Amino acid sequence: MNPMQRKKDRIDKLAEQAAGASADVPDAGKVADTGGVSLIASAWRRLRRNPVFLVGLAVTVLFVLIAIFAPLLAPHNGQTGYLLNQVTPNDPVPGGQDGFPLGADGQTGRDLLSRLILGSRQTLIVGVCATLAGLAGGVVLGTLAGAFGGWVDTVVMRLVDVMLSLPSLLLAISVATLFGRPSQWTLIVAISVVQVPIFARLLRGSMLAQRASDHVLAARALGVKRGPITFRHMLPNSLGPVLVQATLVLATSIIDAAALSFLGLGNPDDSSPEWGQMLGKAQDYFDVAPRLAFWPAACIVVVAFGFTLMGESLREALDPKTRR
Amino acid sequence: MSAAAYEPEVRAGDSLLSVRDLVVEFGGKGRPTFRAVDGVSFDVGPGQTIGLVGESGCGKSVTSLAIMGLLPARGNKVAGSATFDGTDLLTLDQREMSDRRGRDIAMIFQDPLSSLNPVVPIGVQVAEVMQRHQGLKKAQAMQESRLLLDRVGIPDPARRLKEYPHQLSGGMRQRALIAMALACKPRLLIADEPTTALDVTIQAQILEVLRELVVDSGTALIMITHDLGVVAGLCDEVNVMYAGRIVESASRHEIFARPEHPYTHGLLGSIPRLDGTRAGALHAIPGSVADNIPWTGGCAFAPRCTNATAICREQSPALEADPTGIPDHLLRCHHPILPGTDSTHE
Ligand SMILES: Nc1ncnc2c1ncn2[C@@H]1O[C@H](COP(=O)(O)OP(=O)(O)OP(=O)(O)O)[C@@H](O)[C@H]1O
Ligand code: SF4
Ligand SMILES: [Mg+2]
């Protein structure tokens, strides 16, 4: 099986799960809790008691708060070379000391801790923007394909397959070249383009399941037109799995963003620090100060881990097969 | 072929919907064609209730979906006619049909929970139908839907209006669905097993709502069911279907007093009696529709029929008038169970 097919299969499996979540028919007479709203309520009841979810949620919330309040939390600004005077040819990276617990970020003598804190901002912006853009694109394409079916579906899904086959790295390089120089925006475009097909396929799958559902048939039996059928009856009932996927995708966006900036495809301007970019710069000092690589890497891993824990437990909670 | 044998005949009252020789075939490339409905004809007039009865898979739902134009867009072929008030519905395109659905003909389904949109409040779903066909403003439509919920017997309609389907009980959900179907005062209502998913007491209440509707508004009702109790309580005429064809058609009284087709006989025998007078006589018909042989070259019921003889396996019986001469009692059987000649049932 080629990687492309594997990607597709994984997405289709997700869509299937999602379809099951909204289309499973309860036993006759039993007051079942499968309605969309109660589905979320019962999922939340189980999530509240799931330690995995709580850890993920805690990490995520902490990260978001740090990113939002970064300028207030950072003890110093990220630009001034406070420790410049301690830089010597033998010891180019001043170590931890009073007021600068993690020491300097390299020969420039800036405060590493402050730059890590400020870096969370870039990471969050790139991750969230890329995911939102990918989500928007995917929802538009998936809705088109799912609502119209037929040749529209065929054309849209061909396009999506082409996008799915593009490696994000290659795409980022092309986008950066296209825009003239790499920046955080080329990064966002590159990452989101890779996500569009994931969301599109996922949404199309659950839209198709909705199309065959009883309540859509019942609405059609009363003459409800295609517009309201799509936007009131099909789309809201299809979004659940897509939103869960979005939290998972946030984790990969953050890792992707870090990887691309590490390779120099992100914002080259180091006055606004970014974890991947810091990791890249740390290579120059790897023998003398491996901690310069360790801290940004640790941040990336912890944050991505938090989003993944949260997303996976969300998905599990919404999957009818694991529900008791 | 027997499909055409049931010629349109004069029936009491003028008919509102008149279905003639309806055939629905499923199939497509790579799949063998399958006749789910095979030459079905019936009439229903204003204020009249007819029943379509038969076991699971005999084509009841497909018949009604074909009339409504709701079969999947591809992979099926529909033939025959369904004349509603002078127009053959089967010749209309999707847009024209969509204008009529909900306004002239409405349909309610078996499972009230899955037939309602889980993320939209009940009131909005009822109002939606009125906004679609009567061009009402949202506020006006909401006002109307409150009255409508009240009329179908939902207590505290002002509050229920804002609630979501999962907050309602099964019976109330079905009432809400009926309210949606009645929103534009359709002249024909098709109810596809509307009570199957409900408790017995709730079933009776829902049937009462439907009965009042027919009596008060003169709505024509097609009642699809495999529950003969529902037939007994509601239907004027009964069409018993087997494997896509009508095998017996008569008034309610006739069907219960004198079931002549072995299949109808079996169905009636299979109603358990609460008083136990027929203790042990719970008459499950052996086999299932899955044993069907196609109607071509014999009777589809033959493998399960206790009266079957050689001719049943060679010649497909036609839908014909009852041999004892009772009017409006049609049968499709070589060896009907006639009064006095009942050899197989006590
Ligand atoms: N879209 C379809 N494609 C192929 N076959 C179909 C399709 N819809 C229904 N059928 C077949 O047509 C036959 C009649 O189905 P139908 O749903 O009308 O049965 P029914 O009498 O309503 O049964 P039930 O009491 O279970 O609702 C069944 O054998 C079914 O498998
Ligand atoms: S035709 Fe023969 S097999 Fe068919 S129902 Fe009548 S007796 Fe039974
Ligand atoms: Mg059915």
Image (spheres, helix red, strand yellow):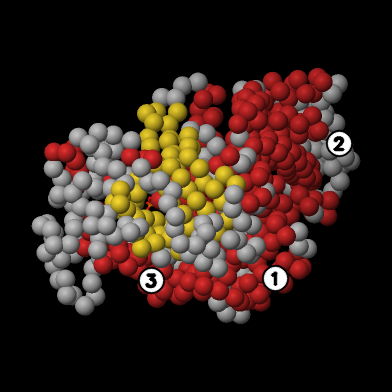
Q: CA distance from mark 3 to mark 2?
A: 82 Å
For badge 2, the amino acid type reads Ser
| Residue receiving disc 2 | A271
Residue B81, percent across and down?
50, 43
Kindly indicate whether the residue at mark 2 contacts the one at mark 3 (C-beta within 8 angstroms). Answer: no
Identify the chain of the residue marked 3, using the numbered disc in the image: B
Q: Residue at x 79, y 23 (%)?
A: A176
Check if mark 3 and mark 2 are on a common chain: no
Q: Residue at x 61, y 77 (%)?
A: B150
| Residue receiving disc 3 | B233
Disc 1 packing (10 Å; few <14; some 14–19; many ≥20): some
**Disc count in the image?**
3
Residue B40 horizontal side relative to residue A43, left or right:
left
Disc 3 packing (10 Å; few <14; some 14–19; many ≥20): few
Residue B111 horizontal side relative to residue B279, left or right:
right
For badge 3, the amino acid type reads Gly
Between residues B106 and A239, which one lies in front from this camera angle?
B106
For badge 1, the amino acid type reads Glu
Q: Residue at x 29, y 43 (%)?
A: B318
| Residue receiving disc 1 | B144
Q: Quadrant of residue B166?
A: bottom right
In the rendered view, tell whether residue B186 sits above or below residue A176.
below
Which is in the foreground here, disc 3 or disc 2? Answer: 3
In the rendered view, tell whether residue B55 sits above or below residue A296.
below
Query: Which quarter of the image is occupied by the C terminus of chain A?
Result: bottom left
